[in-house]
Image (cartoon, rainbow, N blue to C red):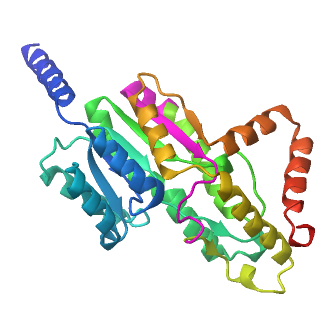
Amino acid sequence: MSNLRTRKNQNERAKENLKNERKVAVVTGSSSGIGYATALQLARSGYFTFATMRNPEKGGDLIRAAKNEELPILVEQLDVTDLDSIKDFMGRRPAVKSSGRIDVLVNNAGYALMGSLEDLSIGEIQDQLETNLLGAIRVTQQVLPVMRAQGSGIIVNISSAAGRIGFQGLSAYVATKFALEGLSESLAYEVGPFGIKVVLIEPGVVKTKVFDNMVIGQAALRKDSPYAGMLDNLNMAFKTWLDNASTPDQVAATILQAISSQEPKLRYAVGQDVVALFEKRRTLTDEQFQEHMKNSMASLAPNQR
């Protein structure tokens, strides 16, 4: 009985010590865009932030910003598609002068694959799934034991308007975001009893390098693709949407708001574009909303502008 009481006291002291230590955040895909802005935002708010990226050589801007502002940021190599890379990062982490804990995980690494489903190869679709969906799963699975041991933590999954609404020419990307939404909702039930929260961030169009980094399916690049006109419309739409796009800093601010809340919501929409779109989706029938989306895209057709 005394041994049980001793272990209980030790656990309580350990939890109390964790509360008094600096909180730690891990952000994937931090070399630019939302990940970059989030790493800075969290560090400015006092989090010891591991800014991870597949290629740390792309972390120069972040390292300089951290040095100029004397921010607690450490750039680390982590490839979300490589389990060994993730395990290697987790093994290095305790050696750093931090508590060894992880309070916030931001699963941000990802890219957009453009092309109709018919034009995409299975390999291209698999690569999209490996990064956007399985990448988040791999990292989360490695972090969860740490959070369970703490009895606390927040997992932030970066979704999209495309996590709840389909878009032509982005079927594979949309599939990964829809899956991430369902995964997050289910995960919230599983980890809630351990004191762990799950949050979905749903930005609309964001002014990042996402369009520069967008991958286009090889068959979709062919001029004789039956879907070529559809992709022209999508490219035109992106240029129009960027005029009213949110900034990475706005997304990062929403992430900070969510993790700072005593009772964070499951979903946070970011940007007037996505808020308006979600409202239309909520108030219209499936058929009405599909007609709205088709008309919106058709209005952007080059021969009508």
- The residue at 63%/68% (across/down) is 113
Q: Residue at x 50, y 63 (%)?
A: 131
Quarter of the image with the C terminus is bottom right
Q: Which residues are magenta?
A: 189-212
x and y, in percent, of residue 262 in the image: 41, 22
Which residue occupies the foreground of this view, 184 or 59? 59
103 vs 78: above or below: above
Q: Give the left or right position of residue 158, taking residue 205 as reference.
A: left
Q: Is residue 33 left or right of residue 46?
A: right
The residue lying at 61 percent from left, 56 percent from top is: 176
Q: Is residue 292 left or right of residue 234?
A: right
Number of marks in picture: 0
Residue 159 visible in this rendered orientation of the protein: yes
- Residue 202 among magenta residues: yes
Q: Is residue 207 above or below residue 278?
A: below
Q: Nearer the viewer, residue 286 or 73?
A: 73
Corner quadrant of residue 118: bottom right
46 to the left or right of 34? left
Image coordinates for residue 168, horizontal then vertical, percent:
78, 61
Foreground residue, 111 or 208?
A: 208
Question: Can see residue 170?
Answer: no
Q: Quadrant of the N terminus?
A: top left
Which residue does the image show at 73% across and 60% down from the upper left?
240
15 within the magenta span: no
Q: Position of residue 221 (x, y in %)?
A: 72, 83
Residue 91 % position (x, y):
21, 56
- Determine which quarter of the picture holds residue 167: bottom right
